[in-house]
Every structure is written in C-alpha cells, then in structure tokens.
C-alpha cells in the first residue's frame, strides 16, 4: 500500500516504517476495542517513552489514510504492545472492528516524543477523552507518586466503563461532551483555578479535540500564566 504525499513527507522527516501483526483482540466496551500486536522490530530499535505513539496506515482504496495511536504496555524485550480504538464511523474504526490474529498494518514512527517534567510536579492536571485514554494511562504510570486531577470527557454511557488506571491519589471528574467541547472548557475554567494552590509545582497535560485543546492551552498559558514548559498540549482529533 502506497502512503501518498504524506508518506513522502514523513520519509523526508526521517520517519521509520514498520509492519505490525495482530495477535489478539479484546472488546473492552461496545465502543472501545483493544488490539494486541507484535511490533515488527520497532521497540528494540527505538526504545519507549511515556505517551509514545505511531501513525498507522489503513487501506482506503487509492487514497492513503493514517491515524495516530498511542502504544499500550509496550514491551521491548517481547516486541509486543497493544493499541486501543475508540470506535465511531471511519476507516480506522472499521478496520479495528474486523481485526483478527494474523492481520497486518503498516505504521510510521515520526513525531512522537515526550519527557516527564523535571523536576517532578507536585500536582498533575490531566484533561482528555476516550481518544487520549491510552496516553492518560501512560502519563499516570510515568508519574506514579504524583497526585492528579483528571477531567475526562465522555460521549456516551460506555465511557463509565473505560479502563482508566487510577490510584487512590487520583481524582477523576467525568464531564459529558456538550456543545462541541465547550462544556468541558467551562468546567475546567470554573474548577482548575481553585485547585492551583502551588502554580509553580503544577503540570497540565491536555489532549482533546483540536478546538478544545487550543482553547484550554490558551487559557492555562495566558490567563493562569503557567510557564510553557509546565503545559503539554496536543489536539488528538478534529471535530466534524
């Protein structure tokens, strides 16, 4: 399968291509599937880091189609990992629904990168949704001793069942998706300032739809005056 102009650009940016093979699948909920893979030698070559993600290519006729997915429980020694798919209409979700052991997908590793903040924050604030759930779990695992407040936007009842890996010092605030994400923005703006007892020790991580992420990033940096290196933000998807 050709990757079109996007593949050419990624090659010029030193993207590395790999083939992943499905070894098993799990239906976590009706709208959320976990698929297990062997890595085609990727992890031994690249190593791992928190919130690590790859661009996966899906067959879409003559037009290449790629989406980014976070690695779940990557094991460089075994050469395995999983990926989790929040299912909706779309080519990637269609592929995930029908995936079976032995199936393969092509992927490109380019653009990923994250280092845990140093010094470690005294308080972690996380804002995400099902699309960024694997990255949220990876981040919490990378900072296991840090108290965290998580605003988690959900779109349907199955969101209550999603596997957030929480500890006793993690506070989860579920927020229903309304008004194309504006409700989440309002919720964060109304509650986050009261929790910022030590702004210098705070670390804010944002990964929602692009518009919501942009609004909250501007808010934390401009209105709350948090330093740029204490806010990490990435739009994980674009609302239609």
Image (spheres, rainbow, N blue to C red):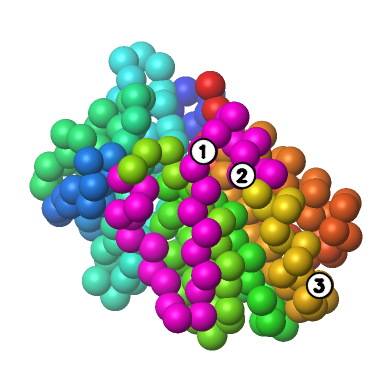
Above or below: residue 85 compared with residue 88: below
Secondary structure category for the residue under label 3: helix
Residue identified by numbered label 3: 199
Camera-near label (3 vs 2) is: 2
Location of the N terminus (image quadrant)? top left
Residue identified by numbered label 2: 184
Gap in angstroms between the C-alphas marked 1 and 2 = 7 Å
Classed neighbour count for the residue bearing mark 1: other residues with Cα under 10 Å, few (<14), some (14–19), many (≥20): some
Give the residue drawn at x 33%, y 20%.
Answer: 60
Near-viewer residue (157 or 222): 157
- The reply to whether the C-beta atoms of the residues labelled 3 and 2 are less than 8 Å apart is no
- The reply to whether the C-beta atoms of the residues labelled 1 and 2 are less than 8 Å apart is yes
Left or right: residue 178 versus residue 29 is: right
Whole-percent x, y for residue 159 in the image = 36, 48
Near-viewer residue (3 or 33): 33
Can residue 205 be seen here? The reply is yes
Give the residue drawn at x 34%, y 71%.
Answer: 76
Q: Which mark is residue 203?
A: none
């Amino acid at each position: 399968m050709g990757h079109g102009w996007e593949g050419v650009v990624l090659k010029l940016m030193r993207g590395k291509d790999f083939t992943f093979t499905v070894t098993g699948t799990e239906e976590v909920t009706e709208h959320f599937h976990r698929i297990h893979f062997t890595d085609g030698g990727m992890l031994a070559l690249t190593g791992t880091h928190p919130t690590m993600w790859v661009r996966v290519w899906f067959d879409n006729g003559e037009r290449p189609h790629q989406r980014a997915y976070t690695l779940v429980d990557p094991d460089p020694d075994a050469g395995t990992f999983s990926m989790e798919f929040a299912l909706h209409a779309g080519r990637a979700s269609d592929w995930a629904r029908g995936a079976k052991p032995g199936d393969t997908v092509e992927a490109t590793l380019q653009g990923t990168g994250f280092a845990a903040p140093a010094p470690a924050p005294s308080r972690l604030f996380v804002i995400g949704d099902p699309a960024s759930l694997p990255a949220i779990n990876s981040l919490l695992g990378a900072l296991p001793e840090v108290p965290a407040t998580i605003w988690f936007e959900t779109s349907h009842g199955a969101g209550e069942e999603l596997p957030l890996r929480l500890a006793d010092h993690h506070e989860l605030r579920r927020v229903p998706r309304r008004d194309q994400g504006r409700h989440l923005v309002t919720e964060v703006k109304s509650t986050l300032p009261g929790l910022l007892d030590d702004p210098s020790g705070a670390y804010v991580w944002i990964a929602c739809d692009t518009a919501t992420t942009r609004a909250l990033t501007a808010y934390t940096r401009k209105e709350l005056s948090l330093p740029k290196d204490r806010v990490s933000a990435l739009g994980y998807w674009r609302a239609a």
